[in-house]
C-alpha cells in the first residue's frame, strides 16, 4: 500500500513495474489475503486434530472481542498516520530540527497520558462504548482542526491545539480498549487475546503509515504538476519534463533542497522561484489530503463500536457479548 502512491494501486503508473498489466500493489495485497486465509484454515485444522494452535480463530466470533480489536486497529491506524504526517510538516516543510520536532509533538503524548490515567479515575462506571465513541469524535475534531489551520505560511504553533485534542481522544481510547478485549474471554484465554491485540495494533500502525504516505505523495504529485502547468512563469518545456520525470510520484522535499537541485540544473531564477512556490503549496495540499483521510477513518471506526459493552468490565451487571 505504501508504494501505491508511486506504483499505482491497480493500474501501474508510467515507469512503474507491472505484473500481468497490473500494479504489484494489488497483487501483493491479494497475496496477503490468501496467506491470511490459509493461516486460518491451518489453525482450524490443528484444533480439529486436537493439536495446539497459535490462535483460535473461533475467538473472533466473540462480538466484544472483535469490536475491541477493530477499534484498536483504527486507533493505531490514525495514531501512526499522525506520527508520520506531522513530523514531515515540522521537519521538512518548516525545517525544524529533530529535537524541535519532538518538542512540538509533546502535547499529543502528554494529553494521551493524562486522558488514559484520568478517564478511569474520573469516570469509573462510565460506558466503555460511550467513552470510545467520544474518543474517536475528539480525535476527529483534532485532525479536522489541523486540516483547517494547515496553510502556506503557517508556523509550528498551529499543531499545538490539534495535537492536544488528538491526544485526549487517543488517551480516552487507550483507557478502555485493553480492558474491553481482555474481559471478553475467560482468564485462561487472555494470553491469546494479548496476541490478537498486538496483531491488531501492529496491522493498524502499518496500514496507517502506508495509507498516509500513499495519499500524501499522490496528492502532492497531482497538485505540483497542476500548479506548474497553470503557472505562466514555468515554461511548457519544463512542465513537460516534470510530468515525465515525476510520473511515479513527486518527492517530499524542502524548499532548500529543491532550490539546490534547480540551481545545479541552471534553471532561471524566475522559473526556479515559481517552481519552489508551487512545490510549497503542493506540500501543504498533500499533507492536508493525508490528514483528511485519517480523519475519515476516525468516523469509519464509529459503527464498529456497537459491539463494545455499555458497562465496565468486572461490574456486577456486565453483559458479555455472545458469539455470533
Image (cartoon, rainbow, N blue to C red):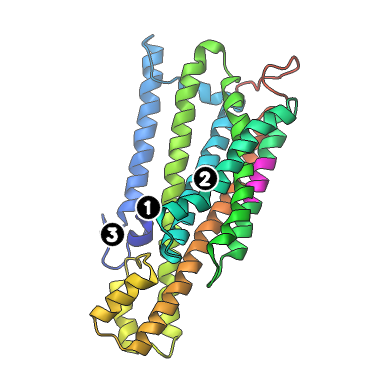
C-alpha gap between disc 1 and disc 3: 19 Å
At mark 1, the secondary structure is: loop
Left or right: 270 as drawn, with respect to 178: left
C-alpha gap between disc 3 and disc 2: 35 Å
According to the image, label 3 marks what residue?
21
Magenta stretch: includes residue 307: no
Tell me residue 55's x, y (percent): 42, 21
Q: Which mark is residue 306?
A: none
What is the quadrant of the C terminus in the image? top right
Which is nearer the N-term, disc 1 or disc 3? Answer: 1
According to the image, label 1 marks what residue?
2
* Above or below: residue 188 compared with residue 71: above
At mark 2, the secondary structure is: helix
* Above or below: residue 1 compared with residue 55: below
Q: Assess whether mark 2 and mark 3 are in contact (beta carbons under 8 angstroms).
A: no
Q: Which residues are magenta?
A: 134-140
> In this rendering, does residue 183 appear at all?
yes
At mark 3, the secondary structure is: loop
Kindly indicate the quadrant of the structure image that contains residue 240.
Answer: bottom left
Tell me residue 300's x, y (percent): 60, 47
Q: Which mark is residue 79?
A: 2
Classify mark 1: residues with Cα within 10 Å, few (<14), some (14-19) or many (20+).
many
* Above or below: residue 252 compared with residue 46: below
Nearer to us of marks 2 and 1 is: 2
Amino acid at each position: 500500500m505504501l508504494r501505491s502512491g508511486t506504483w499505482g494501486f491497480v493500474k501501474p503508473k508510467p515507469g512503474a513495474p507491472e505484473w500481468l498489466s497490473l500494479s504489484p500493489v494489488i497483487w501483493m495485497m491479494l497475496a496477503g489475503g490468501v496467506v491470511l486465509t490459509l493461516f486460518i484454515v491451518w489453525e482450524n485444522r490443528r484444533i480439529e486434530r486436537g493439536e495446539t494452535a497459535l490462535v483460535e480463530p473461533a475467538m473472533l466470533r466473540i462480538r466484544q472481542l472483535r469490536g475491541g480489536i477493530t477499534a484498536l486497529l483504527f486507533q493505531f491506524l490514525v495514531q501512526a498516520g499522525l506520527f508520520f504526517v506531522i513530523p514531515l510538516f515540522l521537519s521538512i516543510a518548516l525545517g525544524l530540527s529533530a529535537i524541535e520536532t519532538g518538542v512540538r509533538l509533546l502535547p499529543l503524548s502528554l494529553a494521551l497520558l493524562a486522558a488514559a490515567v484520568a478517564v478511569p479515575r474520573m469516570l469509573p462506571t462510565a460506558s466503555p462504548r460511550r467513552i470510545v465513541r467520544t474518543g474517536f469524535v475528539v480525535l476527529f475534531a483534532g485532525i479536522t482542526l489541523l486540516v483547517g489551520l494547515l496553510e502556506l505560511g503557517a508556523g509550528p504553533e498551529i499543531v499545538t491545539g490539534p495535537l492536544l485534542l488528538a491526544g485526549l481522544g487517543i488517551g480516552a481510547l487507550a483507557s478502555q480498549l485493553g480492558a474491553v478485549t481482555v474481559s471478553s474471554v475467560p482468564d485462561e484465554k487472555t494470553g491469546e487475546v494479548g496476541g490478537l491485540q498486538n496483531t491488531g495494533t501492529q496491522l493498524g500502525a502499518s496500514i496507517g503509515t502506508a495509507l498516509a504516505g500513499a495519499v500524501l505523495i499522490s496528492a502532492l504529485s497531482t497538485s505540483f504538476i497542476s500548479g506548474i502547468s497553470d503557472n505562466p512563469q514555468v515554461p511548457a518545456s519544463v512542465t513537460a519534463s516534470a510530468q515525465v520525470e515525476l510520473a511515479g510520484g513527486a518527492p517530499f522535499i524542502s524548499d532548500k533542497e529543491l532550490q539546490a537541485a534547480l540551481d545545479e540544473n541552471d534553471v532561471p531564477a524566475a522559473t526556479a522561484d515559481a517552481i519552489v512556490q508551487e512545490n510549497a503549496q503542493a506540500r501543504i495540499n498533500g499533507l492536508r489530503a493525508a490528514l483528511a483521510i485519517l480523519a475519515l477513518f476516525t468516523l469509519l471506526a464509529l459503527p464498529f463500536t456497537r459491539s463494545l459493552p455499555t458497562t465496565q468490565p468486572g461490574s456486577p451487571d456486565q453483559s458479555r457479548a455472545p458469539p455470533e
